[in-house]
Image (tube, helix red, strand yellow):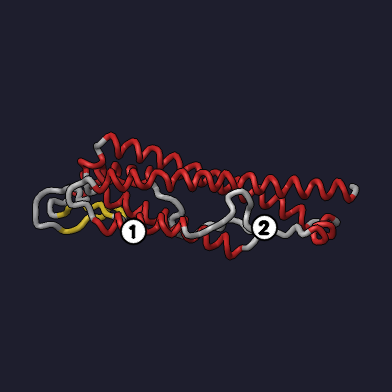
Amino acid sequence: MSAGAIYNSLVGRSQEVDKQWAQVQNVYQRRADLIPNLVATVSGAANFEKSTLTEITEARASVGQVKLDPNKAPDDPNKLAEFQKAQDHLSSALSRLLVVVERYPDLKATSNFRDLQAQIEGTENRITVERQKFNEAVQRYNTAVMSFPTMFLARMRGFQPKPYFVAKEGAETRPKWNSIRQAEDGARQAVTSCAADFKWSARLDSDGLACSPSPVFSAGVVL
């Protein structure tokens, strides 16, 4: 392969990474745009925990403070790590908000909340997909940059390996909208089992379902 062909191939790989980075930025921005409506809807619930709303608002603001070119993928691993940390913090805040919302059945039943829930759930799924596509594009680019003999021309022309998004092992990277609903359904089914011992009751919280001693002769789900 000629030097010109190698160079053109590297340019194409680099543009592919930048294009996918723009898609990642788009879906993250979509999520950020939905949060003010979510906060406004949730804050209308009587006695809703204000600390939860403050956390998610501050997390959204911190995301906006990380400035990266939306059309060019970062070359600095530290910059991408800073961006990912801010986005993951917002994801964790959303997860905690969902847990708290489980305690407000009237709020969950409103059409506004259900619509926002569906939109954010779809956006979270898109974030996962676009981040994976970005990592795949970076892998193809990095393989080209570090392969022999392309690596020599890459160094001469300033093509450097690019960082990936890193999965957080053992931690949530996006709110588990479906998981929370499934846990609630599973809890109701498990209440019957707890009720078999008339002095035990079922409790559903952020850690899952547990049976605990109860002075009453019935079982219920406490959210």
Q: Earlier in the sequence, mark 2 or mark 1?
A: 1
Give the farthest residue toward the left: 216
Mark 1, Cα crowd under 10 Å, few <14 / some 14-19 / many 20+, is: some
Kindly identify the amino acid type of the residue bearing the numbered disc 2.
Lys
Rendered location of residue 49, percent (x, y):
23, 55
Residue 180 image position (x, y, % from top left):
34, 46
The front one of 175 and 162 is 162
Taking depth in this image into account, of 16 and 61 the one nearest to the observer is 61
Horizontal relation, residue 90 to residue 48: left or right: right
| Left or right: 156 in relation to 18 | right
Task: Say what secondary structure mark 2 lies in.
Answer: loop
How many callouts does the rendering have? 2
Residue 213 makes an appearance in the image = yes
Residue 157: give its label.
none
Residue at image location 30% in from the left, 44% down from the top: 186
Residue at the spot 32% in from the left edge and 49% down from the top edge: 98
Q: What residue would you read off at disc 1?
A: 55
Q: Is residue 57 left or right of residue 195?
A: right
Q: Residue at x 37, y 47 (%)?
A: 35
Judging by the rendered image, the residue that carries numbered circle 2 is: 162
Q: Residues within 10 Å of mark 2 (few under 14, many from 20)?
A: some
Q: Quadrant of residue 212?
A: bottom left
What element does badge 1 sit on?
A: helix
Question: Image quadrant of residue 114?
Answer: top left
Where residue 160 appears, x then y in whole percent? 73, 60
Q: Position of residue 84 (x, y in %)?
A: 51, 58
Identify residue type, mark 1: Glu
